Image: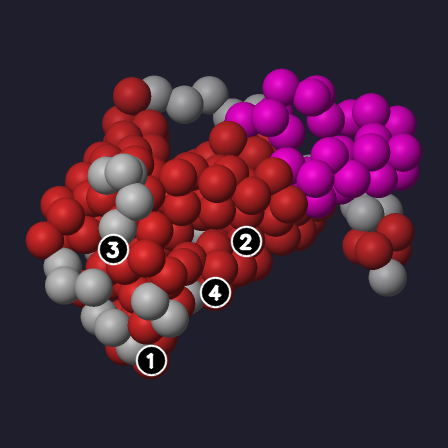
């Protein structure tokens, strides 16, 4: 089925690839980040570790970096490399490597947004239910609802992966080799800002939460 889907060229292949590396890893990031801090808090592991000469900031950074890197490598990088080999084998190298790397970079940033948000929720709530509910709600807002609002295509992260209004997704535009201006890159800048803000808020909250 995969080979049959890759028989065409252009937007058909691009759409399949973009959805594969853009949407599914984001869901995986939510599932992985959901239990990182909550489990450490409810099991007493965090309290025990922090009774040693280690700061809360070091503890949470270690958790954050190891888990987020693991998600990006296993859910974005490795499947992306496999997809590149498969697509080039079927299309005789139609798509340059640089385009794939561009799409994978966008997918990694997209994953980090949802990972950072879920991680933040884990420092706020002490149960996985509210963490998952808030995180999947956040995911659905950008995936399903924001693309329906006219005039927001350049100011939300939804356009990183999915089309919005009459505007193609940024990932698919890169995949198909379209020329992009600064205004087209605004969703990426917003996504990076989200990652920074969510991460800093998680650090701030964990410094003050009761274990």
Instruction: Classify mark 4: residues with Cα within 10 Å, few (<14), some (14-19) or many (20+).
Output: some
CA separation in Å, label 1 and label 2: 20 Å
* Rendered location of residue 24, percent (x, y): 56, 58
Mark 4 falls on what kind of element? helix
Return the mark for residue 120: 3
Are circles 2 and 4 on residues that touch, CB within 8 Å? no
Are circles 1 and 2 on residues that touch, CB within 8 Å? no
Residue 79 lies in the magenta-colored region: yes
State the residue position of label 2: 25
Mark 2 falls on what kind of element? helix
Instruction: Classify mark 1: residues with Cα within 10 Å, few (<14), some (14-19) or many (20+).
Output: few
Along the line of sight, the residue nearer the viewer: 17 or 114: 114
Are circles 4 and 3 on residues that touch, CB within 8 Å? no
Q: Quadrant of residue 118?
A: bottom left
The residue lying furthest to the front in this view is: 52
Number of numbered markers: 4
Residue 192 lies in the magenta-colored region: no
The quarter in which the C terminus is drawn is bottom left
Q: Earlier in the sequence, mark 1 or mark 4?
A: 4
* Rendered location of residue 164, percent (x, y): 36, 52
Residue plotted at (70% across, 44% down): 79
Mark 1 falls on what kind of element? helix
CA separation in Å, label 2 and label 4: 10 Å
Marks 1 and 2: which is nearer the front? 1
Q: Main secondary structure of the magenta part?
A: helix
State the residue position of label 4: 31
Along the line of sight, the residue nearer the viewer: 9 or 82: 82
The quarter in which the N terminus is drawn is bottom right
Magenta residues, start to end = 76-102
State the residue position of label 1: 129
Rendered position, 125 above or below 91 = below
CA separation in Å, label 1 and label 4: 11 Å
């Amino acid at each position: 089925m995969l080979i049959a889907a890759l028989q065409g060229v252009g937007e058909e292949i691009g759409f399949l690839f973009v959805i594969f590396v853009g949407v599914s890893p984001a869901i995986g990031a939510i599932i992985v980040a959901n239990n990182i801090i909550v489990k450490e808090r409810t099991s007493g592991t965090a309290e025990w570790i922090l009774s040693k000469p280690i700061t809360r900031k070091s503890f949470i950074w270690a958790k954050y970096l190891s888990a987020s890197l693991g998600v990006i490598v296993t859910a974005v990088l490795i499947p992306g490399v496999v997809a590149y080999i498969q697509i080039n084998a079927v299309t005789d190298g139609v798509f340059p490597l640089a385009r794939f790397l561009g799409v994978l970079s966008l997918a990694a940033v997209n994953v980090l947004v949802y990972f950072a948000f879920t991680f933040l929720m884990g420092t706020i709530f002490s149960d996985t239910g509210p963490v998952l509910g808030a995180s999947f709600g956040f995911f659905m807002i950008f995936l399903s609802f924001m693309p329906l609002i006219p005039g927001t295509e350049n100011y939300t992260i939804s356009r990183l992966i999915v089309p919005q209004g009459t505007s193609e997704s940024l990932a698919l535009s890169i995949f198909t080799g379209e020329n992009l201006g600064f205004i087209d890159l605004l969703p990426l800048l917003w996504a990076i800002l989200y990652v920074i803000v969510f991460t800093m808020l998680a650090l701030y909250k964990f410094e003050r939460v009761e274990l």
